[in-house]
């Protein structure tokens, strides 16, 4: 969920009204001694700049982040080679300092030949870590406050369809709530015959279900309406992630409460500082929603709503309330801030679309993608992700000539409804400039539109247009030198 | 024979019982049953939650004047929303009325409480739960009514002498009350081929 793109965020991040940006590269607290793991920070300046300058600075910051990441990725290999050459036949270990490892990894000494030395003894502190050579991280979009902000999933580094829990995009409106599950309660009340209060233990006694589902922020891609802005697929599309969610069907809990015949909407409220609230139509609430406590085989991560969140398959992320504490039934929508002044799509005629729930069919090539480089002509596999809030992806087509001709890509199993679907197609690059695009079709027959088509309907009322629900075809330009960049084509 | 038939009958009866038992475990049967977990919350517990509907149901008792709201605003809100409600780290709250239409990618429509918010109850609801940013839920009902009145008066939506309360807040007519339409998607797009042919 970019989850809620608040106006303050938008203004701060995109300089809608008092824009002026300054890019500041700042070292992260976790890696303050390590130059390689800088995170991108775009710092707000109260003065005003024009859009072009703002976007230039956004791009500059992202480029620096890419450079830092590439540098970090290259460094361990260089050090290893140097170490191996220096020691020659003597099997000396290269010492790795804790500050040299990326977030989520542990520093181990690296032997010249792992088959000639004992490995690390078990157990590994009881909870595993990723390789110290893997550098992929979420990056934060610099809103005016880190307490209402979002981070992007590094889709360019993704394999398959599952997003690692630690790389699932984040969106919160009052920071990440820290909640003791032993003290957490879910209230169900309002237009019900039997108001209930559940502990987490109570909720886990109900029959559970598990589903692989994507969650996408409706603001995913908001920088891309007018001109190509972010450089990488992480920046253009990184507000979607897929997890295996486990929990109690919401319908089970609502049946337990005994719905009053008048009950047509459910208010879901979080126990975070924003007390995030959205109204959900009863038909959807009874259809396929989950009260999830599990993610990818373990408990939810704190930033994903620990200990309990709502999952609403196919609906915009901000509705899938995290840190869920309350469900109130009523005969009308509550018209909360997030469903009136935010998360509504303002059109050129001055009217705003409200309750734009579904995330429509969308796809993007994750490799090759912006910021990457092809080193050689010849074979390259084009791969990416496709998803639709309205069901199963039926077809993904790929073009390497800016949409003039299309070839059908192979869809990797499993192909599931409302879930990231991995597509792949072989490509022989002839060394000339190429425009790569992907186009998804879902089970309803809906075909992912071009940006031109989408703007034809939604208009461009301001630098971020109608802000939400940009699901247009993405174009990546492969230049003759192999470099890949974000373009509008 | 008789013995054999009786045996067959017993087997069939057993199968029927087994089939019945299986049916009781199908999802539809399971969904229909009541588990009875959890407890009934007390009215006092539920009273901690405030979620007014646009028609005013759910608003708590209390009231506040514009003058009282100015004091609340200056001490609790101005640091983020600006001395003149012009915004800062927090949203701009007033202005922009009538200026939402446009199709200029270089000019941003100004979305504020005055220009964009369709219901006054939303103001109470949001401030009560989530403001101020660093101390959410800390304002009394009277303070929330008051600061709502102050914002609405500054936006020239209610008079400066207004006192808002449980009864009259929902009666406030917001300028953009008719500014929202339902979701028409999926959309019909102009053919991409047609565009290329132009």
Image (cartoon, coloured by chain):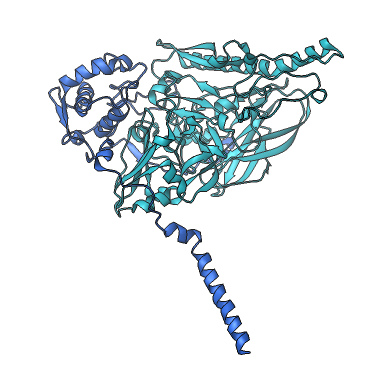
Towards the viewer: A235 or A299: A299
Towards the viewer: A352 or A165: A165
Question: Is residue A68 found left or right of A195 in the rendered image?
Answer: right
Percent from the top left, x then y, of residue A12? 42, 18
Indicate whether B86 appears above or below A288. above
Indicate whether A50 appears above or below A119. above
What hue represents chain B? blue
What hue represents chain A? cyan
Towards the viewer: B140 or A362: B140
Q: Quadrant of the C terminus of chain A?
A: top right
The answer to which quarter of the image holds residue B174 is top left
The answer to which quarter of the image holds residue A361 is top right
Residue most extreme to the right: A89
Which residue occupies 66% across, 13% down? A97
Which residue occupies 28% across, 18% down? B77
Percent from the top left, x then y, of residue B99? 32, 25
Towards the viewer: A473 or B196: A473
């Amino acid at each position: 969920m970019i989850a809620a793109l608040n106006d303050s965020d938008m203004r701060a991040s995109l300089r809608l009204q008092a824009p002026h940006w300054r890019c500041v590269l700042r070292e992260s607290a976790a890696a303050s001694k390590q130059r390689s793991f800088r995170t991108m920070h775009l710092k707000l300046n109260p003065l005003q700049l024009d859009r072009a300058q703002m976007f230039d600075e956004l791009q500059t910051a992202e480029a620096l982040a890419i450079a830092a990441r590439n540098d970090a990725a290259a460094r361990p290999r260089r050090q290893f080679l140097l170490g191996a050459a220096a020691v020659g036949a003597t099997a000396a270990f290269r010492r790795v300092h804790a500050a040299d490892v990326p977030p989520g990894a542990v520093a181990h000494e690296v032997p010249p030949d792992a088959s000639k030395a004992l490995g690390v003894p078990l157990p590994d502190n009881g909870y595993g870590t990723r390789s110290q050579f893997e550098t992929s991280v979420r990056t934060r979009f610099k809103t005016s406050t880190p307490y209402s902000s979002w981070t992007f999933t590094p889709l360019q580094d993704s394999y398959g369809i599952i997003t690692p829990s630690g790389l699932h995009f984040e969106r919160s409106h009052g920071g990440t709530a820290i909640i003791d599950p032993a003290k957490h309660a879910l209230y169900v009340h309002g237009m019900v015959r039997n108001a209930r209060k559940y502990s987490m233990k109570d909720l886990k006694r109900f029959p559970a279900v598990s589903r692989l589902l994507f969650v996408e922020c409706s603001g995913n891609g908001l920088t891309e309406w007018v001109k190509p802005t972010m450089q990488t697929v992480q920046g253009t599309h990184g507000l979607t992630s897929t997890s295996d969610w486990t929990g109690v069907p919401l319908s089970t809990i609502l049946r337990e409460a005994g719905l009053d015949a008048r009950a047509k909407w459910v208010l879901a409220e979080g126990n975070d500082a924003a007390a995030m609230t959205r109204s959900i139509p009863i038909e959807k609430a009874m259809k396929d929603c989950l009260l999830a406590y599990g993610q990818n085989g373990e408990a939810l991560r704190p930033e994903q709503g620990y200990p309990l969140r709502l999952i609403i398959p196919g609906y915009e992320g901000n509705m899938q309330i995290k840190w869920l504490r309350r469900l109130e039934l009523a005969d009308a929508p509550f018209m909360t801030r997030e469903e009136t002044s935010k998360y509504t799509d303002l059109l050129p005629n001055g009217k705003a679309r409200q309750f734009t729930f579904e995330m429509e069919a969308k796809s993007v090539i994750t490799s090759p993608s912006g910021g990457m480089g092809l080193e050689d002509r010849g074979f390259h596999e084009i791969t990416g992700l496709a998803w639709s809030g309205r069901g199963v992806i039926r077809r993904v087509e790929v073009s390497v000539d800016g949409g003039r001709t299309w070839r059908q890509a192979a869809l990797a199993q499993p192909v599931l409804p409302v879930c990231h679907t991995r597509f792949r197609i072989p490509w022989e690059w002839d060394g000339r400039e190429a425009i790569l695009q992907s186009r998804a079709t879902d089970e309803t027959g809906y075909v992912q539109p071009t940006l031109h088509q989408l703007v034809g309907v939604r208009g461009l009322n301001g630098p971020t247009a109608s802000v939400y629900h940009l699901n247009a075809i993405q174009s990546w330009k492969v230049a003759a030198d192999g470099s890949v960049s974000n373009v509008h084509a | 024979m008789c013995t054999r038939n009786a045996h067959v009958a017993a087997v069939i009866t057993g199968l029927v019982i087994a089939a019945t038992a299986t049916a009781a475990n199908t999802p539809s049967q399971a969904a229909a049953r009541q588990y009875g977990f959890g407890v009934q919350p007390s009215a006092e517990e539920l009273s901690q939650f405030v979620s007014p509907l646009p028609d005013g149901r759910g608003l708590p008792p209390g009231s506040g004047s514009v003058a009282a709201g100015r004091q609340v605003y200056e001490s609790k809100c101005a640091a983020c929303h600006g001395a003149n409600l012009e915004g800062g780290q927090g949203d701009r709250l007033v202005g922009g009325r009538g200026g939402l239409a446009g199709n200029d990618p270089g000019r941003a429509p100004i979305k504020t409480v005055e220009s964009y918010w369709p219901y006054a109850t939303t103001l109470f609801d949001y401030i009560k739960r989530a403001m101020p940013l660093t101390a959410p839920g800390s304002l009394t009902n009277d303070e929330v009514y008051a600061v709502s009145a102050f914002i609405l008066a500054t936006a020239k939506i209610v008079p400066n002498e207004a006192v808002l309360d449980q009864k009259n807040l929902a009666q406030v007519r917001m300028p953009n009350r008719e500014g929202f339409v339902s979701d028409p998607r999926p959309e019909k797009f102009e053919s991409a081929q047609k565009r290329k042919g132009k």
